Amino acid sequence: MSNDRQNRAARAEQMRKEREKADRKQRNLITVGIVVVVIALIAVGGYGINAASKANEKEDKVVQPANATKDFGIVYDAAAAGATPPADAKPVSVEVYEDFQCPICRSFEEQSGDFLRQQVASGAVTVTYRPFSFLDDTGGSPNDYSKRSTSAALCALDKGGVADYIKVHDYLYANQPDEGTPGPENAALAKAIDGLGISGVDSCVKTEKFVPWVKKARTTASDSDRKVDSTPTVYVGGKAVENPSPQGLQAAIDAAKAA
């Protein structure tokens, strides 16, 4: 009888040890599984962060268009206008911050554009256009037309020079969509530019190649001493012009020459 109890006790102890061993094995397997899952999640997360970082880096890569200045300007002078001014001409600097989606910019072009072109051709001024595409962010366009159209114009500048940029510049104002409405998509912009006799910009326009440059141009102007925050903003001889009508511009040009 005593032996039976001892045997049962021994079997019970053996079974207890086996259960503990099985429990330890199960816990170890669970622990290993958790570690594997955590490592996998870290790896996936790291890959995602790296991929996102590379995507952002690609998206934000600023490529400067050929024929643009390092301070985000497009200089329209007598040579770009195909004119030969007097040899002693000393042109006054005119700078125009503009947004192709801006109705007031279009009004400015309608009112003063021809005057400025005449002044450029005569050698009286050089005009530096400074893209300031901000209306996408204030409800001016639901499909980023402001930045995309500027990038498209810069594609023409990059490919053919300032004269081609001016062609697209004038076309965009003449065909400006109503503020708050979607503008033409990239394929339509590329087709319109080709219709102006400017070829070879299809891929540039459709990939929005210069949008990062456009964004950088805006932040640079906003953060500068001038604190640009609206369009059109016009400077003549380095001084802001409150009345950029032909009369106001002429007065500012005369004052700059006198100074």
Image: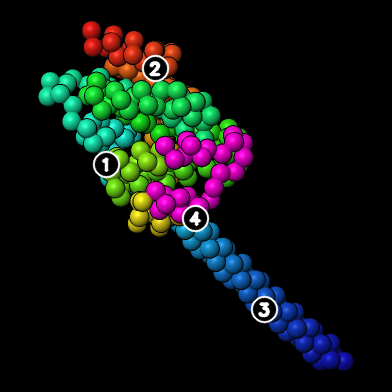
For disc 2, the neighbor class at 10 Å (few under 14, some 14 to 19, many from 20) is some
**Residue 99 falls left or right of residue 5:** left
- Disc sitting over residue 187 in the figure: 4
Q: Residue furthest left?
A: 87
SS of the residue at dot 1?
Answer: loop
SS of the residue at dot 2?
Answer: helix
Residue type, mark 3 in image: Lys
Tag 2 residue: 246
SS of the residue at dot 3?
Answer: helix
- Nearer to us of marks 2 and 4 is 2
Tag 3 residue: 21
Residue at figure coordinates x 75%, y 83% from the top left: 15
Marks 2,3: beta carbons within 8 A: no
Residue at figure coordinates x 59%, y 36% from the top left: 178
- From the top left corner, tell me how far across and down residue 151 is, in percent: 42, 44
Q: Quadrant of residue 19?
A: bottom right
